[in-house]
Amino acid sequence: MKEIVFNKSRLKEDEITEVLEKSRIVLRNSDNEIVLTRFGRVYFLPGGKIEKGETPVDTIKREVMEETNINILLDDVEPFLVVKNYLRDYETHEGTIVNRLLITYYFTGFTTDDNIEYFNLTKVEKEDNLRGFFIDMEEVDELLSDYNKEDPRATYLAKETLEVLEEYKKKDDIQ
């Protein structure tokens, strides 16, 4: 499995104050569209934080069901890519400043569902109007180039998502 490392701020291992693991999925349909999620002005692939006792696969299944109510078929139970993102002086949702290592496991999958429904969103997800939608792969670049550059979360997620989709396209060409 390939690994990508983002460490623009040259954060060292001994400076890390928080490690967070997530799982996300490149989820496609029969029209070769993928699902993107919008949370405020931040766009990303569906997924979320790995909870205590969960595997990365458990997380994908739970998060996709919570966020979209879509049934998925994973291509593999192993991620095709792992991204390590070192974030210096990152402000958490609680307002705390941390030096975070974010490890994200990326999977690929397929769905025959065309409708995205929202039935189990958190209070914050409801307040910030979390929405998932299908988008043609070719339109993602344009959409993600219009992110909120003042928001560090939007910045790293846009860059990471674009990089992940490039790797996905390479992987897809090989198979």
Image (tube, helix red, strand yellow):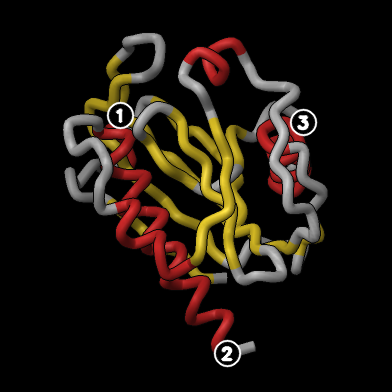
Q: Earlier in the sequence, mark 2 or mark 3?
A: 3
Quarter of image, res 23: top right
Residue appearing at x 73%, y 45% in the figure: 115
Percent x, y for residue 126? Answer: 57, 16
- The correct choice, above or below, for 124 with respect to 89 in the image is above
Numbered disc 1: secondary structure: strand
On screen, residue 131 versus residue 107, left or right, reads: left
Percent x, y for residue 109? Answer: 71, 62
Numbered disc 2: secondary structure: helix
On screen, residue 43 versus residue 1, left or right, reads: left
On screen, residue 75 versus residue 165, left or right, reads: right
Residue designated by label 1: 99
Residue designated by label 2: 174
Residue appearing at x 66%, y 33% in the figure: 67
The residue furthest bottom is 174
Residue designated by label 3: 53
Quarter of image, res 29: bottom right
Q: In this figure, what is the number of numbered marks? A: 3
Q: CA distance from mark 1 to mark 3?
A: 24 Å
- The correct choice, above or below, for 152 with respect to 108 in the image is above
- The correct choice, above or below, for 158 with respect to 75 in the image is above
Mark 1, Cα crowd under 10 Å, few <14 / some 14-19 / many 20+, is many
Q: CA distance from mark 2 to mark 1?
A: 37 Å
Verify CB contact (< 8 Å) between mark 1 and mark 3.
Answer: no
Q: CA distance from mark 2 to mark 3?
A: 34 Å
Q: Amino acid at mark 1?
A: Asn
